Amino acid sequence: AQTVTQSQPEMSVQEAETVTLSCTYDTSESDYYLFWYKQPPSRQMILVIRQEAYKQQNATENRFSVNFQKAAKSFSLKISDSQLGDAAMYFCAYAPGGGNKLTFGTGTQLKVEL
Amino acid sequence: GAVVSQHPSWVICKSGTSVKIECRSLDFQATTMFWYRQFPKQSLMLMATSNEGSKATYEQGVEKDKFLINHASLTLSTLTVTSAHPEDSSFYICSAPNPAEETQYFGPGTRLLVL
């Protein structure tokens, strides 16, 4: 069975600084997708970024980028120029090829301080 | 991006009653939808996969007679919590994959409180 581990229950970052959230996963599949979702206090799940396992290039979306280390089964999220609106719970998620059935990590609560 | 709606957003019911939650994909068709449950400050746990035109697939430990799922059309899935009890109180979230984007979109969730 696939598992997703987020070892940081909470993280804090100063506004405008950079923070990295960690995620590791375990799978025997070769074709899969990895995601970072953001859940603000409204509890609406918002896709932040996605990575296809077959792509070696790390995905980027504006201030958000990932460090995908396939051999190490590591998928960290870097948030640059942190903003107050980035404060939320962040979930790392895994899906097998086809990208449908998601397995979530336990989440990291990110606080952004002035 | 695509939009998924859920209704109702909030429901309070008495113990023993049944509650129906609707999940709709508003601008794309979804042959599959997913239902999750989330307790406070915890992660999302997949309950079941809703399949249009066939029976839902339930995750281990989820009672299929308790949580009835019907995928009535390519844009609508419903979750009915039957004979609800206080321990069923939770936040229920649905999601639908948009095949054109190979991305799942989530509904805003439904808070259920059983008294």
Image: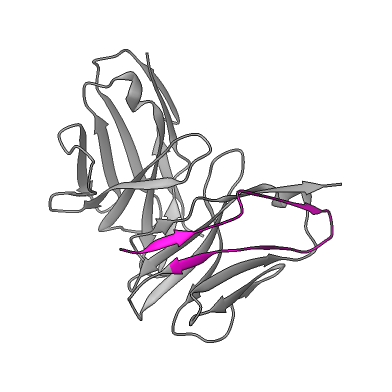
Residue A20 coordinates in the image, percent (x, y)? 69, 64
Q: Where does the image place residue A29, in percent across and percent down from the top left?
A: 33, 76
- Compared to residue B26, the image places residue B109 above or below, namely above
Q: Is residue A10 magenta?
A: yes
Task: Using the image as rendered, state which of residue B3 and residue A91 is in the foreground.
Answer: A91
Occupied quadrant, residue A83: bottom right
Residue at position x 83%, y 53% from top?
A14
Observer-nearest of B75 and B55:
B55
Work out whether residue A24 or residue A96 is closer to the camera in this orientation and state it: A24
Work out whether B1 lies above or below A98.
above
For the point 35% across and 64% down, the residue is A2
> Is residue A52 shown left or right of residue A39?
left
Over which residues does the magenta segment extend? A1-25
Q: Which residue lies most toward the right here?
A: A114
Image quadrant in which the C terminus of chain B is located: top left
Q: Residue furthest bottom?
A: A56
Magenta stretch containing residue B18, yes or no?
Answer: no
Q: Which residue is at a point 38% across and 74% down the rendered structure image? A: A32
Answer left or right for B31 relative to B99: left
Q: Which percent across, then down, holds residue B6?
A: 40, 39
Drawn side of residue B59 relative to residue A48, left or right: left
* Identity of the residue drawn at 31% across and 58% down: B29
